[in-house]
Image (cartoon, coloured by chain):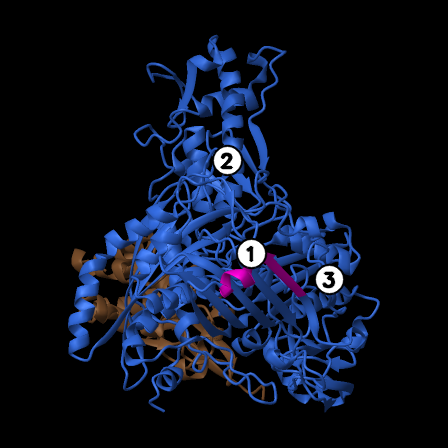
């Protein structure tokens, strides 16, 4: 392997900012997103969705709706009984998690505003919507359980009667002697209630599905805007009663996903059912209202936390109780308990912590469903620990950087475990913090802050030290019975023209997956990137694998591609050695040619080798069996997850008259191991930070007292736009993971996981001298003014 | 409800005549009738900017205009920007100023409008101008830098 990561060889693409192969197409308007697809005889779906948070469905009068010209079919929940198998979002490794069976269209009872209750299929989406308007639904509103904090109280509406209460799952972690630590007389204790609003992904491309059923071959093709093609292949096959090999899932361009598009949605399943029943292609493309009331929501936690620190700033104990509402069901198949589980696993994980107790209660409620969205659990976990840590630092008069220096795990202390039992290795918290302090010019900022304070300008600096879950092993989902692959594969084929055709089971949603796969294949095999063509997102033509989620594309898919490229190179050199009558190790492949390994002089073009093999096998010895294609798979075996770490800081200014927070600058130091493409990683980190800014300052799914979501347009639900987004400085520490040759860990979720904590700390740093603090996100102007005592 | 009107719209130099439903918005007409799917639909009420196109030389939201209002108009979409946007496309690719690419056609339209109006490379001014174009993937910084590159390089 020596030389693989040297930068001055020919084709040394790993580690360089190589532009992505998909850019040109997308820049010329030639992308292919699902809603761009027009198939012969294709019809369009629209859904009637429950206007109530909770209601009995007595029935539907479809008379007028059926009269709309162009209507092909109308379905209600009962029509799907026996046509599709119900689904339940539980996994066996989340012991005790319960949920009820779901169907694509609600039957008898609707349990959230936005749940699909009826479906119209028509010759145009407009006609389908016209007919939806004319469906007379006989619904009877029921009392709704809305507030997660009251979901378990006596007298609250129980959503699934058989369960007896609204508890979906509960877990407690109790390590060390927490009570004794809090009882020590030499500790300072801080205690806060931290509230995290419900927000959602707002992918610019809404969810969309084209389901195409061919009865002659009993074949279903799903044109999918999503992250996990093979998972969806399994799910469609199982629930529609098709052989798995008869289901093809194709994901071409995906207009953002962020975890929103890795779940099973009733409207998409209903579209598949309709395609099968009608024996023709059916398209469903969600509009923005549908996205807001049916794309999974995330966060929505209320945490009561306590931390004790001694006089030297050492954390003596950390404890908290978390309650989170997940909607009326646990999402299928990944479940809605993973986020709370991650909060328990990750809180305090960057720190040397001996006494840790945490309890999480996951409860049902009559709101849209919640599930895994970018940086699952991380923003909660980081804000709990780092929020309390900076609060404690202020209480004992210690600098927030200094208190981290005293508590962060030492860079030479790995392998080790977190208090919650997570296996950790190859992390660099101390180095990352020092680099952060250096690039932000911390001392100068503090001096400037003090000066401006005298002029009545309130600026704040806040930090977070964080871990990020990446490269998950089978312990994440597969172990619990989920049809989700943790291994991924890569296939490389040398074609007659001397180019490489590569395929991978990880998927592209804009991260640059196709780009880094191209870089790795070209680099390791020894060919210019222009000669590499990449295929991802097709269950028929790629190896079997998990897709892209949990920051696994580069670390797992990339390692499979590296191993495959090494294997193909070996195979090609074996053939070349016979043709050139030398030993394979005397040869190498550089710039698309077989060369003499020592001198680098060209011996044979790869196209000549391939053409001989493919066209003129008669020139080769009969016992030579050339294989110009190789496939390798990779899974993480040493760890449940390969953790990464980072350190981030926010600089904000608070207008105490308006409550507005301006983010002046943001810094992120990230250790994702081997950086395959700095340009891609940096903008991934920035995009993640901006999503974190959204969650911390702007984004919230606001529900009225009747359980209706009130801000279901992009004019009402605020996302960060360019003008309010700061410059973000990104720097790297590279500690490659020992679990793979490539050494890459994930990077894409760090910003979203860390930014909210850093921002909350910065805002509190700004307003602390005013005797105020805020512990609720998003930190809206109104909440700020309340925190400041101005209203 | 399904009343139609015969209209002729010149899109990227090609005249398209159709009986368009009077309620159909322009971006849907472009996508379905002209088969030009580069202009994207994100919010359908003028907030996200994904459907930004040019109508008679003005940048407009394709979702806020009815197709029948474009009768007789000259429309340019991302597929028709040609050499005018060559520098922008180059800068966007070099800077990785796009990830999923869904906002990109609208972002290019807004950037082109800014540059051709003589906009400066002032980062804050660029940010202000593209604040009607939502990008969920990048942190906007690469987009801002790509636009500034073109202005500083003197070529759209």
Q: Nearer the viewer, mark 2 or mark 3?
A: 3
A456 up-or-down from A208: above or below: below
Q: Quadrant of residue B3?
A: bottom right
Chain drawn blue, letter? A
Badge number at residue A345: 1
Query: Which chain is the one coloured brown?
Result: B
The magenta region covers: A170-183
Residue B35, percent from left and from top: 49, 65
x, y percentage for residue A656?
28, 83
Q: Which residue is mark 2?
A: A740
- Same chain, marks 2 and 3? yes
Q: Is residue A42 left or right of residue B116?
A: right
Residue A329 position by quadrant: bottom right
Q: Earlier in the sequence, mark 1 or mark 2?
A: 1
Q: Position of residue A406 (x, y in %)?
A: 36, 52
Residue receiving disc 3: A96
Q: Residue A69, image x and y in percent?
A: 67, 83
The residue nearer to you, when weighing B121 against A350, is A350
Q: Quadrant of the C terminus of chain A?
A: bottom left
Q: Give the numbered dot on residue B27.
A: none
- Say which element carries label 1: helix
Q: Residues within 10 Å of mark 2 (few under 14, many from 20)?
A: many
Which quarter of the figure is the N terminus of chain A placed in?
top left
Q: CA distance from mark 1 to mark 2?
A: 24 Å
Mark in the foreground, 1 or 2: 1
Chain under label 1? A
């Amino acid at each position: 392997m020596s030389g693989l990561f040297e930068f001055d060889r020919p084709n040394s693409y790993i580690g360089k900012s190589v532009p992505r192969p998909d850019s040109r197409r997308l820049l010329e308007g030639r992308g292919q997103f699902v809603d761009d697809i027009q198939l012969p005889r294709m019809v369009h779906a629209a859904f009637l969705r429950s206007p109530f948070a909770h209601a009995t469905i007595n029935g539907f009068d479809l008379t007028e709706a059926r009269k709309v010209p162009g209507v092909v079919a109308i379905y209600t929940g009962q029509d799907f009984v026996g046509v599709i198998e119900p689904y339940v979002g539980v996994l066996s490794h989340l012991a005790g998690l319960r949920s009820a069976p779901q169907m694509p269209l609600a039957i008898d009872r609707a349990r959230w505003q936005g749940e699909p209750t009826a479906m119209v299929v028509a010759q145009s989406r407009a006609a389908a919507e016209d007919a939806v308007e004319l469906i007379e639904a006989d619904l009877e509103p029921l009392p709704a359980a809305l507030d997660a904090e009251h979901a378990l109280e006596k007298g609250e509406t129980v959503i699934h009667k058989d369960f007896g209460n609204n508890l979906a799952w509960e877990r407690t972690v109790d390590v060390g002697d927490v009570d004794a630590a809090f009882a020590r007389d030499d500790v300072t204790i801080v205690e806060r209630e931290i509230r995290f609003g419900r927000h959602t992904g707002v992918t610019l491309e809404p969810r969309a599905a084209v389901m195409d059923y061919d009865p002659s071959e009993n074949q279903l093709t799903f044109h999918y805007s999503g992250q996990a093609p093979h998972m969806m292949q399994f799910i469609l096959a199982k629930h529609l009663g098709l052989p798995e090999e008869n289901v093809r899932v194709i994901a071409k361009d995906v207009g953002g996903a962020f975890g929103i598009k890795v779940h099973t949605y009733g409207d998409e399943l209903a579209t598949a059912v309709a395609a099968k029943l009608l024996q023709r292609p059916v398209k469903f493309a969600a509009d923005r209202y549908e996205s807001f009331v049916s794309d999974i929501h995330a966060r929505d936690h209320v945490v009561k936390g306590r931390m004790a620190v001694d006089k030297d700033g050492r954390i003596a104990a950390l404890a908290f109780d978390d309650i989170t509402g997940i909607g009326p069901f646990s999402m299928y198949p990944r479940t809605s308990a993973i986020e709370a589980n991650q909060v328990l696993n990750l809180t305090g994980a960057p720190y040397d912590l001996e006494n840790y107790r945490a309890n999480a209660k996951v409860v049902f409620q009559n709101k849209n469903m919640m599930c895994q969205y970018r940086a699952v659990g991380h923003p909660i976990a980081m804000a709990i620990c780092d929020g309390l840590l900076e609060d404690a630092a202020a209480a004992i008069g210690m600098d927030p950087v200094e208190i981290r220096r005293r508590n962060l795990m030492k860079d030479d202390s790995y392998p080790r475990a977190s208090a919650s039992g997570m296996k950790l290795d190859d992390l660099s918290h101390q180095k990352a913090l020092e680099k952060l302090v250096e690039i932000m010019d911390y001392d100068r900022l503090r001096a400037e802050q003090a000066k401006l304070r005298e002029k009545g300008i309130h600026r704040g600096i806040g930090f977070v030290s964080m871990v990020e879950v990446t490269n998950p092993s089978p312990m994440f989902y597969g172990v619990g019975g989920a049809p989700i692959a943790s291994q991924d594969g890569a296939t490389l084929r040398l074609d007659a023209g001397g180019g490489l055709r590569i395929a991978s089971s990880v998927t592209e949603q804009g991260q640059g997956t196709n780009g880094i796969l191209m870089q790795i294949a070209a680099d390791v095999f020894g060919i210019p990137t222009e000669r590499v063509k990449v295929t991802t997102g097709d269950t028929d033509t790629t190896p079997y694998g998990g897709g892209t989620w949990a920051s696994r594309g580069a670390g797992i898919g990339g390692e499979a591609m590296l191993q495959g490229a090494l294997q193909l190179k070996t195979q090609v050199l074996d053939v070349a050695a016979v043709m050139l009558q030398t030993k394979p190790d005397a040869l190498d492949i550089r710039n698309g040619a077989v060369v003499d390994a020592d001198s680098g002089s060209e011996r044979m073009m790869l196209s000549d080798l391939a053409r001989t093999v493919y066209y003129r096998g008669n020139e080769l010895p009969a016992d030579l069996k050339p294989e110009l294609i190789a496939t390798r798979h990779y899974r993480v075996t040493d760890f449940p997850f390969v953790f990464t770490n980072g350190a981030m800081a926010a600089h904000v200014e608070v207008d105490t008259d308006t409550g507005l927070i301006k983010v002046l600058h943001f810094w992120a130091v990230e250790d994702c191991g081997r950086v395959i493409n700095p340009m891609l990683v940096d903008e991934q980190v920035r995009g993640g930070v901006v999503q974190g800014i959204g969650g911390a300052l702007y984004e919230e799914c606001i529900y009225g007292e009747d359980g209706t979501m009130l801000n279901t347009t992009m004019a009402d639900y605020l996302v960060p736009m360019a003008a309010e987004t700061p410059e973000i400085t990104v720097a790297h520490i590279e500690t490659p993971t020992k679990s793979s040759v490539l050494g890459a860990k994930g990077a894409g979720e760090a910003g979203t996981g860390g930014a909210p904590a850093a921002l909350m700390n910065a805002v509190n740093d700004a307003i602390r001298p005013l005797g105020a603090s805020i512990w609720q996100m998003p930190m809206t102007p109104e909440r700020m003014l309340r925190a400041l005592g101005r209203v | 409800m399904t009343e139609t009107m015969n209209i002729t719209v010149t899109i990227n130099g090609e005249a398209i005549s159709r009986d368009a439903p009077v309620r159909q918005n322009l971006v849907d007409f472009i996508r379905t009738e002209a088969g030009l799917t580069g202009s994207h639909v994100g919010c359908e009420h003028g907030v996200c900017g994904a459907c930004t196109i040019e109508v008679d030389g003005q940048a407009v939201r394709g979702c806020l205009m009815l197709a029948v209002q474009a009768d007789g108009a000259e429309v340019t979409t991302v597929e028709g920007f040609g050499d005018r946007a060559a520098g922008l496309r180059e800068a966007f690719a070099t800077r990785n100023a796009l990830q999923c690419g869904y906002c990109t056609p609208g972002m290019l339209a807004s950037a082109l409008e800014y540059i051709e109006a003589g906009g400066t490379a002032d980062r804050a001014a660029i940010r202000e101008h593209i604040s009607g174009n939502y990008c969920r993937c990048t942190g906007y910084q690469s987009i801002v830098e790509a636009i500034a590159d073109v202005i500083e390089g003197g070529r759209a």
